[in-house]
Structures are given as structure tokens and as C-alpha cells.
Image (cartoon, rainbow, N blue to C red):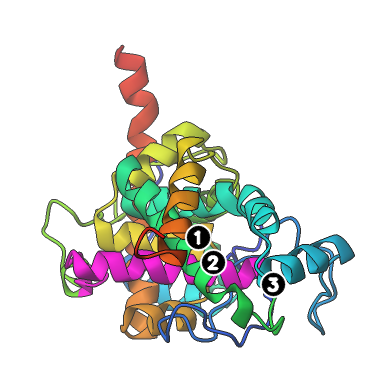
Amino acid sequence: MIDCPDTLNCEQFQNQLPELLGSGTVVAEHAHLQQCELCRALLADLETIAEAARQLLPVVDPPEKLWEQIESAIKSEKSPNGT
Amino acid sequence: MSNPGFSVRSRHPGSEAPGGKLLEGATPRKTAAEQGGGRSHLPSPAPDEAKLLSEAQAGDHQAFARIYSQHKRRIYSLCLRMVGDIAEAEDLTQEAFLQLHRKIATFRGDSAFSTWLHRLAINVVLMHLRRKNLSLVSLDEAMEPSPDDGPGRSFGAADLNLAGSIDRLALEHAVADLPAGYRLIFILHDIEGYEHNEIASMLDCSIGNSKSQLHKARLKLREALCAYPRQEERR
């Protein structure tokens, strides 16, 4: 268990965290983090999650049949009367 | 401690909005194919890509088929992540490429083609979600999720610690299990690389709401990921 030296300050800090992170501030330099291992751990985890998310871009292929369906739909659009 | 400035990314400037005004100006993360260009100007398409685009714009079906082949994975995966349903993702991918076929002649090269196509696909998904009245949508719901949906605070929850590593599969599952509003913003920001102002524009919410929801999504993912190994250990 990690001890947090000041729960109130943790609450205040964590309430500010969305704005701090979203603004591009270097949160690691925030004064609260210099004394709070709990919030440092939280921030490290959030950073880890954000980094891991970037690795999720590589991905899966659609089924082969999808192109056939798209081709068919394109042909239908070109010849709406089936001509 | 490392610098947690994880909201800062490099982007392509973009000006075209292929699928309506939802994503006007929005610029997704660079794909691998786009990376390597300078930041001060738009990358010129590779000669092969430019030729392929030109042929497709002129109505060459084989060229369009090659474009589909090159981009199908990224577009399908985007759709699948955003809706979480294979059949819906297939339908949305099909709709995205049909719209591409209708609009490809209007692509002027003001942004990278993959960026333009990506925006088109996201617009297709967002329109679909809006038709389903899902909450991006119902961001109100995401703003005020039920107590069961919301992430827990970390005060005193000090045993949560990811120890700097995340199992990719666990993260995929955790993202899929997020409430719709959280999932959407997490995907758009952390996976697809949009900025908060872009997301706010897409979803008709404030920038503050986008930041808040992203933070809650990450907190909820943290809870899920910290619980993941414990579930495995019980097996």
C-alpha cells in the first residue's frame, strides 16, 4: 500500500488532472507530485495506458466478401435500373 | 519520472471535410505511410499513389480496387472499434468506401489522402451512431454516467499499479467494455490521435468535456487493467 501524504491535496490534484493533461502541461513537474507517491503512480499508469493505446492502431482485415459487396453496390449505383 | 505530456502529437494540417462538416479541420494521427514528411508542409503523395488516385478519380475501377486494398484494414478497424460489432463494422466500411467512390473525384490533395479518407470514415460512423441515438451523442450520458459506469477515484486506492506495462489483448478488451461515450472519446484521442478541440467539434461538446471524458475513460481502463491479471490468476 502506498501512503499518500495529503488526501485533500490528492483530491484537488486529481480534479485538476484532466485539464492539466489536456493542456499539454508537463504534469510531472507539478508540486503535488513531488510529495505524493499515490498520484505519481496514478499518472504513470495513465501515461502507460495512453502509450499502449497508440500501439493499437495495427489491426484486422475485413472479410474478403466485403469487396464483392462494395463492387456490387458500385455497379448498382452506376446502373440504378439494372441496365 | 517521464514526462506525461501524452496529449501532444504531431499532425497533418487538414482543410477538407469529405463527409460533411462534422470533422471539419480534424486531423487524425499520421499513418505509417504518412510519417516521415516534414511538419511545415503537406507531404506530397508518392508518385505511385498520385497516379493511382488520378486513375481512380478518372473512374478506373481497378485503381479504386487497389485503393480499397491499401486502406481497408485501417478503415475497417476504425469502424469495428467504434461500434464494437462485426456486422455493423462491415456495413460501415462498405458505406465509407461507397462514399469514397462517390466523392473521390472531389479530393484536391489539400491533405493527405489517407487523412481525408479517415475523416470520411469517421463521419460515416458518427452519422450512424447519431441515427442510433447513441451517446456521443448522448454525451450527456457520458458526462453523467451511472455510478456503475464511472471510474473510481484513486484516493486510497494505492494498490492499483500497472507497473509500466499493459497486455495488448487486455487493453483491447477493456476498451471494448467501456461505456459508449467514454470509448468514443478514448478511441478518437488516444488511439486515432485527434486533439480535444477536434473531438469537441465532432461531437458538439465542449473541449472541457472532451478532456474530462478522456480522463474518466483512462481511469476506467486503469481499473479494468489492474483487475485483469487478478482474473487470470483465479483461473
Determine the residue positioned at 57% across, 68% down: B117
Q: Are labels 1 and 2 assigned to the same chain?
A: yes
Which residues, given as a range, are shown in magenta?
B113-139
On the image, the x and y values in percent for residue A79 come to 43, 64
Secondary structure at badge 1 equals helix
Please name the residue shown 52% across and 76% down the image: B195
Alpha carbon separation for disc pair 1 and 3: 16 Å
Q: Residue furthest front?
A: A83
Residue identified by numbered label 3: B58
In the image, what residue occupies the spot 88% across and 66% down?
B47
Q: Mark 2: give few (<14), some (14-19) or many (20+) Cα within 10 Å.
A: some
Q: Is residue B92 left or right of residue B105?
A: left
Residue B106 in picture, x, y percent from top left: 60, 82
> At which x and y percent is residue B81?
40, 50
Give the residue pinned by disc 2. Answer: B101
Quarter placement of the C terminus of chain A: bottom left
Q: Is residue A79 above or below residue A61?
A: below
Q: Residue furthest right?
A: B47
* Among the two numbered marks 1 and 3 on one chain, the one whose residue lies closer to the N terminus: 3
The amino acid type, in three-letter code, at marker 3 is Ala
The circle on residue B97 is 1
Residue B132 in the magenta stretch? The answer is yes
Q: Residue B154, relative to residue B140: is it above or below?
A: above
At which x and y percent is residue B29?
62, 66
Local packing at callout 1 (Cα closer than 10 Å; few below 14, some 14-19, many 20+) is many
Q: Tags 1 and 2 in contact by the CB under 8 Å rule?
A: yes
Nearest the eye: B148 or A60: A60
Q: Nearer the viewer, residue A35 or B54?
A: B54
- In the image, which is nearer the foreground, mark 1 or mark 3? 3
